[in-house]
Amino acid sequence: MIQIQPITLPLNQGTITQMILTFRNFATTDNMCVVHYQLLAEDKTVLVTGDYHLTEQQYAQWGSDNAFVEQCVATYLGLTII
C-alpha cells in the first residue's frame, strides 16, 4: 500500500489516502506495459480505479526499482507520495 497525501473527492465521495498498483500481463519482449491503479480511502474502500500506460522511455528507465513506476503514476494522477 502506497501512502499518499490525502485528497478529498467532490460530492462527499470520500478522501483518498492510499494507492495500490498492479501490472497487467506483459511479455519479456514488450517495451511498455499497463499499470492498473486503485485509489483507496483509509478504510480500504476503493474510490477510483484506472489504467496508466508506461511509455517506452519510462519502461526502459524502470529497471528493478518499482518506486520509479509508483512515482510515474502518482505524477500522472497529480498525487504526492508520503
Image (cartoon, rainbow, N blue to C red):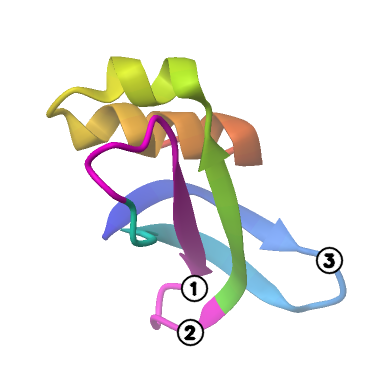
Element carrying mark 3: loop
Q: Who is closer to the viewer here, 28 or 59? A: 28
Q: Earlier in the sequence, mark 1 or mark 3?
A: 3
Which one is closest to the eye, mark 3 or mark 2?
Answer: 2
**Residue, disc 2:** 45
Vertical side of 16 occupied by 77: above or below: above
Q: Are marks 1 and 3 in contact (CB under 8 Å)?
A: no
Residue 3 lies, in percent from the top left, at 34, 51
Q: Indicate the position of residue 63 as horizontal and vertical percent values.
A: 18, 23
Q: Which residues are magenta?
A: 27-46
Q: Amino acid at mark 2?
A: Thr
Q: Is residue 78 visible to the viewer in this orientation of the structure?
A: no
Residue extending furthest right?
11
**Of residues 41 and 48, which is closer to you in this image?**
48
Quarter in which the N terminus is drawn:
bottom left
CB within 8 Å, label 2 to label 1: yes
Q: Which residue is mark 3?
A: 10
| Residue position marked by numbered label 1 in the rendering | 41
Quadrant showing the C terminus: top left
Q: In the rendered image, which quarter is residue 76 located in?
A: top right
Q: Residue at x 40, y 83 (%)?
A: 43
Report if residue 16 is visible in the image.
Answer: yes
Q: Residue at x 43, y 47 (%)?
A: 4
Find the residue positioned furthest to the front: 29
Does residue 11 appear to the left or right of 51 in the view shown? right
**What amino acid does circle 3 point to?**
Pro
Which x, y percent locates residue 19?
A: 41, 58
Q: Residue furthest left?
A: 64
Within-10-Å neighbours for mark 3: few <14, some 14–19, many 20+: few
**Residue 74 placement, left or right of 59:** right
Query: Is 77 above or below relative to 7?
Result: above
